Image (cartoon, helix red, strand yellow):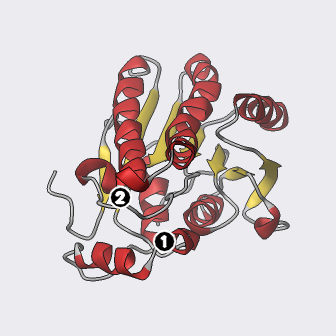
Amino acid sequence: MSFDLSGHNAVVTGAARGIGLGIAERLAQLGVRVCGWDRDPSPAAGHPAFAEMLTVDVADETSVGAAAANTLERFARLDILVNNAGVNGPTKPAWDYSLAEWQRVIDIDLTGVFLCSRAFAPHMRANGYGRMITVASIAGKEGNPDACAYSAAKAGVIGFCKGLARELVDAGVTVNYVTPAITETDLFAEMDAAYIADRKARIPLGRFCRIGEIADMVAWIASPRCSFTTGAAFDVSGGRATY
């Protein structure tokens, strides 16, 4: 990339592995000082992409509040928030879901985005600048069979980001989201082989999304160059998305 983000500070949630780690690495390559948040940060211990790494449960209000205060104490200013932490949940019909299984997906994938965004919105408003980016999913647009909880959470994220974007539109803070197709990450462990094959078959380009492709898109949205788009989806679906 021909631009850098030197001097910017970022939080990336779910940063210890997979998409979150890829995003953190790309931001760090562009000069961003990254604080990684993860419920289990040990896989990324000592990784050079991170200036700080904190243990955070994004579904827990107290944990998020403490981590936000800690981050601002260490960094003084936050320019970029990447809401990436998420789970897929069991791959089975909605009528076979227990309430506990449903609630876990909603708590992490939707409520976690709300809690983290809420934690930093006043700070970004006060500074007159910010970039909030959420990793949503094509499932939030189309719905995925055998993943109704995940689809519902990601659709909720899309609605939340659109509403928040309009609340922050006068403050120099943009709120956008990316909608990837299925990407080969640790979440595959929560999916059965038939589910994975079905999702791949839905992608016109005929392959899974790559972590680096999501990371590059997020880096662009996180930059000052992406200045006239807010409340919008950035598609990374290999041609699957129809809107």
**Closer mark to the observer between disc 2 and disc 1:** 2
Closest to the observer: 233 or 3?
233
Q: Which mark is residue 127?
A: none
Q: Secondary structure at mark 1?
A: helix
Q: Is residue 180 above or below residue 76?
A: below
Can residue 107 be seen here? yes
Q: Which residue is mark 1?
A: 212
Query: Could you say where residue 31 lies in the image, as x and y percent from the top left?
Result: 65, 56
Q: Which of the two discs, 2 and 1, labels the residue nearer the N terminus? A: 2
Q: Please, what is the three-letter code of the amino acid marked with disc 2?
A: Pro
Residue drawn at point x = 36 percent, y = 80 percent: 194
Determine crowd level at label 1: few under 14, some 14-19, many 20+ residues with C-alpha closer than 10 A: some
Closest to the observer: 218 or 227?
218
Residue 100 is left or right of residue 35, and the answer is: left
Q: Which residue is mark 2?
A: 93
* Label 2–label 1 contact, CB within 8 A: no
Which residue appears farthest toward the left when viewing the image? Answer: 242
Query: Could you say where residue 167 lies in the image, as x and y percent from the top left?
Result: 41, 18
Query: Could you say where residue 208 lies in the image, as x and y percent from the top left?
Result: 37, 77
Q: Secondary structure at mark 2?
A: loop
